[in-house]
Amino acid sequence: MATRQSSGRLRFYGAAGVVTGSCYHLTLDGVSFLVDCGLFQGNKTLRELNYQPFPFDPARLDFVLLTHAHIDHSGLLPKLVRRGFKGPVYATDATRDLLGFMLPDSGYIQETEVQRLNERNRRRGRRPVEPIYRRVDAERSVRQIRGRPLDAWFSPVAGVRARFWNAGHILGAASIELELAGAGREGAPLRLLFSGDIGPQEKAFHEQPEAPVDLDYLIVEGTYGDREREDVTVEQRRELLRREIAEALAAGGNLLIPAFAVERTQELLNDIARLMAEGRLPQARVFLDSPLAIKATEVFESYAGELRDLGDPGVPGDPGATPFRGTGFSFTPRAEQSRRIGRITEGAIIIAASGMCDAGRIRHHLKHNLWRRGATVLFVGYQAPGTLGSILLGGARTVRIHGEEIAVRARLRRLDAYSAHADQGELVEWVRRRLPVAQAVFLTHGEPAALRALKQCLAEAGLERRKLIIPKLDEEVELAASGKVRLVAEAARAEPEKIADLDWHNAYAGLLVELSERLQALPDDAAREALLRDLQRRVAHD
């Protein structure tokens, strides 16, 4: 008698053709669950997906599995809870500890940003909007997180087994191995692996990524699928940072470093403390101006015994010195402290969130420093299309911050050696080590060009091209143990070309800046009035 094969489905509700919004929905014999539930980041068209209803019923989910704490993988958990999800969320212990303050902080940001927006809407006669979720929703979601160790199987519900593997990305980051009972060949479990975000082979704090082999389906990230970085050791990376800091201080202004609050900030603090303690950099004022990053640093300090390559800041007699707090470092959680930093015009190293410059205190520091020729802005992480960081690196001469036009005269620098993502070659090697994969390798969590390049490289490395699939947003696949893999398109919530690059909101902002520059360049008011009349006629005619 033939063994009945269960029917499972996988739906790509995020990180499909884009880097953010990671969310995969799986169903099997009445069981419904998510792998990740992340916030969309990037252009405004993409961010508006955060406000739309979920394309599934949160109240019917049995549980959620999280790869790691970054907001693009976890940031919609509070909305999930707000919309009726009451089940457990499984993550590593470190991820649970980080989210204990990251999610409430995200809820606070949602509330305060919407409050400012509604103040503007009232003045413009527009209807008020609701935040994606509130701090209370985030606090409730934190209470639903259950910590689980690496390398140990657990069963969230009957018929599903899961295991976390070290992904080498950030503190607590994991790849997730799944076994779905009865869905494989002849009634055997169907085996899936979600990579999460994979770290590079040379990474401070963490061992190299690990994961199982011999799978039915592999879902792998491709953030840097089209990029090969120069191979550098941790010490070589530290030397690159030393040069950037030395040049920035010699330029005579402040050095701003927009940094992600988790992992990137702690790596920078550790490296700067060591460089100064060893005398390779002069002592300078270092400010960590991010309440979220300060709390994250405290979590890193509590896990210091499990982290590699921390070293010692080597500051004898300084009771406040830790691997992340050198002499002269100031952590500034309060707003009035941040405002005082804004009055410093030279010689300070200011690390602040957010890493893509789209929110947080870094925007205030950019307002104070971008127009200064001696200032430097050092980017050390990925910049999604449409974000302020991406626009600055794209060569904008003027940008709008908090409604003000700010000239860009500062030195703009980029240092890729701090990336927490594997590059193209490392991704190809990681996938090769997972083989054989019986059914399909889904390439996700990347921009279209990066995913296409990664697909080509994997094919050249010997993987069957028919097994290499790039899903689109909201597509689904039946998880069969054999036969052709077919993606079924649902009605997508957004068109792929409008979420993976600059959108009309970016074009509108750029037009305003360009118009202002053009008006200022004209010789007199008569010429300016003539230009505006011509523009008004064109708009009225269209």
Image (cartoon, rainbow, N blue to C red):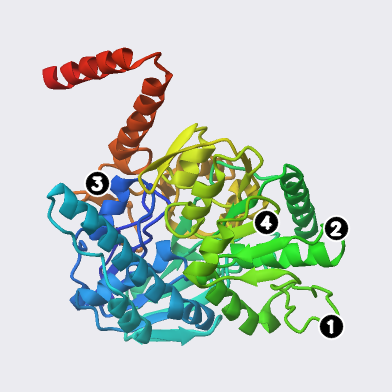
Q: Amino acid at mark 4?
A: Ala
Q: Amino acid at mark 1?
A: Gly
**Is residue 159 shown above or below 506?**
below
Return the residue at label 3: 494
**Is residue 506 shown above or below 424?**
above
Q: CA distance from mark 1 to mark 3?
A: 58 Å
Residue 242 visible in this rendered orientation of the protein: yes
- Rendered location of residue 370, percent (x, y): 55, 42
| Mark 1 or mark 3: whose residue is earlier in sequence | 1
Return the residue at label 4: 348
| Mark 4 or mark 1: whose residue is earlier in sequence | 1
SS category of the residue bearing label 3: loop
- Rendered location of residue 315, percent (x, y): 83, 76
Q: Nearer the viewer, mark 1 or mark 2?
A: 1
Q: CA distance from mark 1 to mark 2?
A: 20 Å
SS category of the residue bearing label 2: loop
Q: Quadrant location of the C terminus?
A: top left
Q: Quadrant location of the N terminus?
A: bottom left
Q: How dense is the environment of label 2, judged by Cα within 10 Å: few (below 14), some, or many (20 and up)?
A: some
Q: How dense is the environment of label 3, judged by Cα within 10 Å: few (below 14), some, or many (20 and up)?
A: some
Near-viewer residue (285 or 216)? 285
Return the residue at label 2: 280
Residue located 27% across and 61% down the image: 114
| Mark 2 or mark 3: whose residue is earlier in sequence | 2
Q: Amino acid at mark 3?
A: Ala
| Mark 2 or mark 4: whose residue is earlier in sequence | 2
Q: Amino acid at mark 2?
A: Arg
User: Residues at badges 2 and 4 in contact (C-beta under 8 Å)?
Assistant: no
Q: Is residue 276 left or right of residue 13?
A: right
Image disc number at residue 317: 1
